[in-house]
Image (cartoon, rainbow, N blue to C red):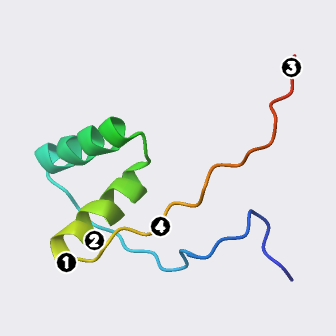
Amino acid sequence: MARPGRPTQDPKDERVTVRLAPRDRQALEAIAERDGVTLAEAARRVLRGALGIPPLPVPPASKKPRRKS
């Protein structure tokens, strides 16, 4: 059975649980808010940066016209 959701070139099937000190959680939240991403995406970006892995390419924005309400 196919899984619902949008297709992706970068599936995220692995789950990792990490315990953080309050100051570390606040720092991660600040990064997420600054970049306008989720905590999970902020953690992935920090991890990639620490490992020297380049960020994943961002797909171009859709050029569909917006519907007027």
The reply to whether discs 2 and 1 touch (Cβ–Cβ < 8 Å) is yes
Query: Relative to 48, does residue 27 appear above or below in the rendering?
Result: above
Which residue is rendered at x = 19% and y = 77% of the image?
A: 51
Left or right position of 2 against 16: right
The reply to whether discs 3 and 1 touch (Cβ–Cβ < 8 Å) is no
Q: Quadrant of the C terminus?
A: top right
Q: Earlier in the sequence, mark 4 or mark 1?
A: 1
State the separation of the CA atoms marked 3 and 1.
44 Å
Q: Nearer the viewer, residue 53 or 38?
A: 53
Residue flagged by tag 2: what amino acid is it?
Answer: Arg
Q: Nearer the viewer, mark 2 or mark 4?
A: 4
Q: Which mark is residue 48?
A: 2
Q: Earlier in the sequence, mark 2 or mark 3?
A: 2
Q: Disc 4 marks which residue?
A: 57
Q: Earlier in the sequence, mark 3 or mark 4?
A: 4
State the separation of the CA atoms marked 2 and 1.
5 Å
Q: Which mark is residue 2?
A: none
Residue flagged by tag 3: what amino acid is it?
Answer: Lys
Q: Nearer the viewer, residue 38 or 21?
A: 38
Residue lying at the far bottom of the rendered structure: 1
Q: Nearer the viewer, residue 60 or 52?
A: 60
State the separation of the CA atoms marked 2 and 3.
39 Å
Q: Residues within 10 Å of mark 4 (few under 14, many from 20)?
A: few
Is label 4 in a helix, a strand or a loop?
loop
